[in-house]
Amino acid sequence: MTTVTPSSWMEERLHQLTPILERLIASEPVAFDERLRGKLPAVQGIYAISLKDGVPGDYLRAGKADVSLRQRIYQNHYMGDQSGNLRQQLIKDKICARLEDTKPWIRQHCRVQFLVIENGKERTIAEHLMLAVWQPRYADEGSRGFPIGEKV
């Protein structure tokens, strides 16, 4: 009879999930430029927004897109003005003074990586692991995020 220890089942689950995050990290970074919208697929997945010249592992935003990656990244974080999106978080963090300053700042400093995951359960689990391990600077209001330098 095989004894299952807490560490063995946790290691097995991490072993199964880690390749998802590795594929995201290995995906081609996409610039926030005039071609961004066309490069983002209209399907569900996970994404990570980081600084172009940032330290590996430091992410500004990371999450899942339940409608489409194009809608979540382009419409919400880049074009939108909702309270929990990247543009509003840059203002709240005093990186940008006004909403109109945020898009040029994002174009100059940010990039996004994404991975298509159409299975809802797998996408949600990947998002939870990504947020727990990567601890992005910003997250949705109610905040799952940690300011860089204040990682757990």
Image (tube, grey):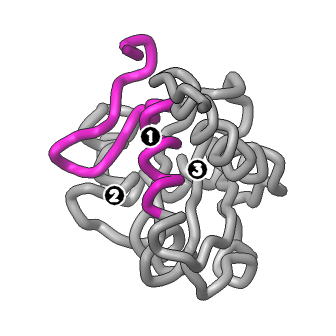
In this rendering, is residue 5 above or below 109?
Answer: above
Q: Judge the density around disc 3: few (<14), some (14-19), many (≥20) Cα neighbours within 10 Å.
A: many
Report helix, strand or loop for mark 3: strand
Q: In this view, does 1 lie above or below 65?
A: above
- Where residue 10 appears, x then y in whole percent? 52, 31
Q: Quadrant of the N terminus?
A: top right
The answer to which of marks 1 and 2 sits earlier in the sequence is: 2
Residue at screen point 59% across, 79% down: 118
Which of 42 and 91 lies nearest the eye of the viewer? 42
Which residue has dot 2 on it? 85
The amino acid type of the residue labelled 1 equals: Leu
Residue type at mark 3 is Ala
For discs 3 and 2, the disc positioned in front in the rendered view: 3
Residue 53 location (% of width, % of height): 73, 30
Res 42 quadrant in image: bottom right
Q: What stretch is highlighted in magenta?
A: 124-152
According to the image, label 1 marks what residue? 131
- Which tag, 3 or 2, sits closer to the chain's start? 3
**Residue that appears at 68% across and 64% down:** 115
Amino acid type at image mark 2: Asn
Dot 1 falls on a residue whose secondary structure is helix
